[in-house]
Amino acid sequence: MTGGRVDEVEQSLRAVVRGEVEWGAGARALVTMDASNYRRVPRGVVAPADAADVAAALAVCREHGVPVTARGGGTSIAGQAIGTGVVLDFTRHMNRLLDIDPAGRTARVQPGLVLDDLRRAAAAHGLTFGPDPSTHSRCTLGGMIGNNACGSHSVAWGTTADNVRALDVLTYRGEAVRLAGTEEDCALPGRLREGIARLADGNLALLRTGFPQLPRRISGYALDRLLPEHGRDVVRAFTGSEGTLGVLTEATVALVPAPAARALAVLGYADESAAAQAAHLLLPWRPLTVEGMAADLVGEAAARELPRGGAWLFVETGGDSPAQAQALAREICRAADGVTGHAVVADPARQRALWRIREDAAGTATRMPDGTEAWPGWEDCAVPPARLGAYLRDFRALLAEHGLRGAPYGHFGDGCVHVRIDFDLVGPAGVARFRRFSEAAADLVVSHGGSLSGEHGDGQARAELLPKMYGPEVIALFSDFKDLWDPDGGMSPGTLVRPDSIDSNLRFAALPDSGSRAGDVEFTYPGDGGDFVAAVRRCVGVAKCRSSAAVKNGGSDVMCPSFRVTGEERHSTRGRARLLHEMLVGEVVTDGWRSQEVKGALDLCLSCKGCRSDCPVEVDMATYKAEFLHQHYRGRLRPRSHYAMGWIPVWLKIAARFARPVNFLGRLRSTAWLLKRIAGVAEERDMPELARETFTRWWHRGDTNEGRREGVGGPAAGPADGPSGGPAGRATTVVLWPDTFTDHLSPEVGKAAVRVLRAAGLHVTVPPAAVCCGLTWVSTGQLDRARTVMRRTLDRLAPVLDAGLPLVVLEPSCAAALRSDLPELLGTRDPRAARLAASVRTFAEALEEYAPGWQPPRLDRTTVGQTHCHQHAVLGDAADRRLRERAGLTGELTGGCCGLAGNFGFEAGHYEVSAACAEEALVPALRAAAPGAAVLADGFSCRTQITHLAPGPPARHLAEVLAEALPALPPPGRSRGRPIPPGRPREAAARAGAYQCGQAGCADLCAPPAGHGRRSPAGPAA
């Protein structure tokens, strides 16, 4: 990979290519893998600006004998998007929609255009592109044409090949080819025109008899389409050639009318074979989809929401109106035989939720229920639909025979099955079993008259096995066709024709043994057996993190905000995982934890944790980033922002004594500039103001010495007739966590929460000493310090843990840190960590669980704002949604990430990306909000970002909005009174000077606040 020849190729490319030419380790590392089991290291990457750039790059590669691989979204599952020469990345520049012809129902596209971008543009004309693989939010049209992608709607609209009208192609030799309609319509070089005619006319019998006839025959070249009766359809023969014949530079594709309304019939069956056997019988009703999946993929929680059964068919219907679509769905339910239950889903949101299960299957299927890894490799065969039930029974038996497990699912209406299998692709014995099984599975598919590939193409994953399906004569024709187009063998060698063996180039082979190169890591990685290598290996490349779609109001996805801003692979979760993978391998990225390539990619990771929930395989890049930063800076000086913002709980505690002068200095331009410079804070940011009185000072202001000694030892007696979550009419004591942000920067949130929790009949207390979740040290990778802080917190919370009290945390990022980071950093080394994590409740969860009968004040207002990304990823917001609904707060909060993300948006160099993240959905939603709408944001970062970027009504925590509507209460602080601990007689309390708090519905006696002179009916004045 080094030496004059490589330098000469790079220099020659830079001289003629106007797009990017990248020869560095980072750029090469990003494209060593796609979504397959395979890995190839390229010489370099070229992002052509246009077709002329492609021609120029091909000329240089041809001159130097360097092979070329075309790459779109990199979601290929058979290894077609990786190569050892130059990789052409079409997603950066050649990604435009050139034209839409609504009357002719066609569109002209460049190969790097993402499918969903085409569909959004076509939707404005009531049209869509029919094929829709589950990767529709990031796969490209070029990749779809290369693999002849299909998707769930192929029963209605066919494969990609059925929807391509014309192709502009450049051969490796630089010949410009125009493929359109029949052979006569094509602009072909003479040698190609004559060669195609000679190949077709000389093999008529073989072309008519050697190709199985089934709807999902994707394997091999579609040479039977060159027959005269098919009009010598060269477009169809080229489509699905997997980049082995030439480079696509433009395509004209057909569009179809999109149904005005859709409904979903969900049919339950006893098992997947029964569902598969029934699927083709539903085709006469002309559904849009007939998809199947079994219980081992759906999971228990989702299965409870489906009709009774062990497997299900999702049958989508379309119509000119909702009534028409639903009527057809009900008719299908009535006509279906052998069902164990059925339902018609009309609600679009519920339909989307169900389809998400199916679309995420390519990722979720990579983990068995027990956490065992499963992989592609036998991913998407197809058989005649009427034989699918029998095939699945035989396939399950074959899995058992080889001691393997998998969860089949897929396009049952077309006879196509996807499955991830728990192959061991690391050890020699496991790889040998992978080969034995693959050979036997190929024989099984052929015995049922099927195709080894029914969607993703052959690539390296199945091409070696094609002789079992086609026989030697057809395989020889494939070689002839390849050589006709690419006599120099420069297009994707080792793919489809004369392929590499199925068990070579495995991406796992290059990785070190578990832990051997990772060194001592700090997090416990509980889902990966404590193995950082296995954690990084989680990323299978399905690239949901590369979604091109902006997050809409109420949208569920957060990841990956920095990728959506930059569009660069290295800023996607997959890109970062690939760089970590190559860091562990040490071949391309050679400096391990000191890697600048990995550091640079992680710099724009917001640690939003969105990938933890949105990634189908739950890659947790925020944790990997914290681990990397810890290892990278071990024994070295860190950036100024790590010392400033990583240690912010300490600095705020010191500064709290001087809040007024610190705030004054922060408002002066000169001193603010200096402070920001010292702290590594972006100049564009305003310094947050310190509270004049912290929440904890407000809380403890009225404490007696006796009260401090009592601490939080147990639940207190509560009102006999008030709301109660405890037994025998006792109100529950909840411990309110005084997080750093609430305590020092927004104590009004804590005060409001106290009011609301007490109004709900709960007794509130706070920890007896300062506590911290350690989040700021985690996010900056200072894990030793984070661990020290967390252990100190556990020591101080011993009474809370011993009493089993719930811990109410108002700041979502702190709650997420306590639920996830703390136990995953301390692990089983400190069993208290799991107990603390289990005790954490959000504000809404505490009200719902411990005051279920409480009715919040009715506000009847619309809302706008932000759901905190950590809440989305770790905590969930279902309880918040229900609480808002009970309070009459309508409207959806924005999904995604606000872009500030704790220290990220404050750090110098991050402002533009931070603001762009907010502009994606949050800021537009605020601009479009109705007058008087309540602006909600429970996270301090979210509220700060809104203040900085969206002038208008201030954003508030939900507790503040609810507290504002409550009746007026007595004076502030703990002047509401301190609950008398259990076992302390009221008479003793009266002798000590008891105080009746006056809270509505409270009949309890409370210890008085210091200096409060109100006389209680039960005792003398305090």
Image: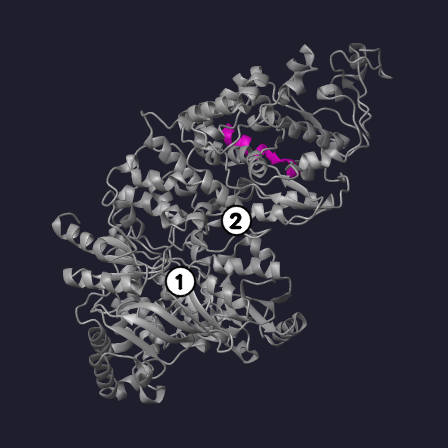
* Magenta region: 831-845
Q: Amino acid at mark 2?
A: Glu
In the picture, measured across the screen, residue 807 lies left or right of residue 888, that is left
Measuring from the top left, give residue 431's x and y in whole percent: 27, 55
In the picture, measured across the screen, residue 122 lies left or right of residue 86, that is right
According to the picture, the residue beneath numbered tag 1 turns out to be 140
**In front of the other: 348 or 902:** 902
Measuring from the top left, give residue 630's x and y in whole percent: 37, 31
| Res. 209 in view | no
Where residue 663 sits, quadrant-wise, is: top right
Where residue 847 sits, quadrant-wise, is: top right
Q: Residue at x 45, y 32 (%)?
A: 682
Label 1: few (<14), some or many (≥20) within 10 Å? many
| Element on which disc 2 rests | helix
Within the magenta stretch, is there residue 760? no
Residue at the limit of the structure toward the right, as seen here: 1017
According to the picture, the residue beneath numbered tag 2 turns out to be 920
In the picture, measured across the screen, residue 195 lies left or right of residue 895, that is left
Which corner quadrant holds the C terminus? top right
From this view, report whether residue 945 is shown above or below residue 124: above
In the picture, measured across the screen, residue 360 lies left or right of residue 600, that is right
Measuring from the top left, give residue 401's x and y in whole percent: 35, 62
Between disc 2 and disc 1, whose residue precedes?
1
Q: Amino acid at mark 1?
A: Thr
